[in-house]
Amino acid sequence: MIIKNCKLINSDNTESIKDILIENGKFSKFEDSISSTEGHEIVDANFNYVLPGIVDVHTHMRDPGMAHKEDITSGSMACARGGVTTFLDMPNTIPNTTSYELFVEKKANAVGRSYVDYGFYFGGSKGDNSQEIPSVHSIAAATKIFLNVSTGDMLVEDGTVLENIFKASKLVAVHAEDDMVARAIDYGRSTGIPLYLCHLSKESEVKQLADAKKEGLKIFGEVTPHHLFLNREDVAKSERSDLLLRMKPELKEKSDNEALWKGLADGTIDTVGTDHAPHLIQEKLEKMTFGVPSVEHSLEIMLNGVKEKRISLARLIEVMTINPSNIFKIKNKGQLKVGYDGDLVIIDIKDNSPFSQDKIISKSNWTPYEDKNRGGKVITTILRGNIVYSNGNFNNNKIGVEVGYYD
């Protein structure tokens, strides 16, 4: 495949126009002009921006056990629609993936069903499953621990169990809010295990992350698009219901939005992950149900941050593709670089149409950004040199495979 007339963002935030050659699923050449095109599929980017495929390391695809909300196929289609070419799925499905056997079953369940590439977390259990963790080191993205709230047996509160799980893990990702952030950092400090703080939502949490980094700890922080763009005022003024914009962690104040943006721009916060947590619209409107879908529109809403000059496009690429791949050691993902997987997304930065005009791909059938305009629109998503989505149409060949990890 050759992608012509690509507008690329360089690491210094300058721009260049290149043609890209993808051979055998890998980036092969980046040249001013590739004239020898015989035998290659040609895609014309028409001088639109071309970014590396988005890597979303925080999703809940609900499969198995809650597939009426989302499944691997529908969730991966939402990914492709949003320019996401790789996602990592959390372990709090039904059953929780807290044993080697259940983890392997979940892996097998996904084979041949995804439009994009994928990986899985292993879940820490309050019953102390630390002895199981070494068996999945080479095939799991990280160990996920819930310190505030979770389903099944995944809320871990006992200190000895927490220490055991940390020590057995290669990387620990935590759901930690308020005081639990400090507790998670303490375990990262005492064990020396790298720590990934999911979905930071408060100014005080950003400060704790910054202080831990200054201390020299192996620690990373994530923010979601909804915690950047929405706050409690949006809950109160929601046109359909104040039940829609409820999630864990809950939305906070405008001042927290500002602190999160500052932390993302200055390097304190390392990644943007969606915490894609779909529920059917009727479930959200009937009773308090925590979680929002987000993967389908994450890149398009984040491009508003570029438009508003809160973040450069080069930094956006860093936090949505490069850093996620590097932190979780995902092989050959996240960069437009020779030898890497030929994953990319073409965007129309001039399309600022409202999200309300979209047909929603996710089974949830709604978006938390329905009263907002996008900062740019995904035109085409390419996975390993294959078009999986373009201009509203999907390639029906489900070519997504499980990612690999480097040591």
Image (tube, grey):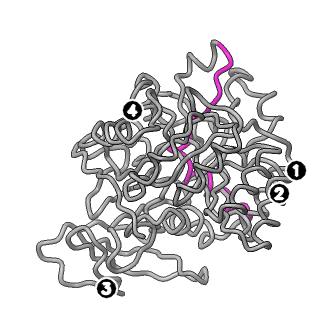
Residue 54 placed where, x, y %?
48, 59
Q: Position of residue 265 (x, y in %)?
A: 73, 67
Task: Quote the CA–CA distance across marks 4 and 2.
Answer: 34 Å
Which residue matches tag 4? 71
Disc 3 target residue: 33
Looking at the image, residue 91 sits to the left or right of residue 159; the answer is: left
Q: Amino acid at mark 3?
A: Ser
Judge whether 65 appears above or below 262 on screen: above
Query: Does dot 4 land on a helix, a strand or a loop?
Result: loop
Q: Which residue matches tag 2?
A: 259
Q: Secondary structure at mark 2?
A: helix
- Say what amino acid the circle numbered 4 marks: Asp
Q: Nearer the viewer, residue 309 or 175?
A: 175
Q: Residue at x 55, y 61 (%)?
A: 320
User: Could you give the CA–CA distance between mark 2 and mark 3, rounded to whole angstroms?
Assistant: 43 Å
Left or right, 133 with respect to 159, comes to left
Q: Are marks 2 and 1 in contact (CB under 8 Å)?
A: yes
Disc marking residue 255: 1
Q: Which residue is depicted at the point 77% across and 56% down? A: 260
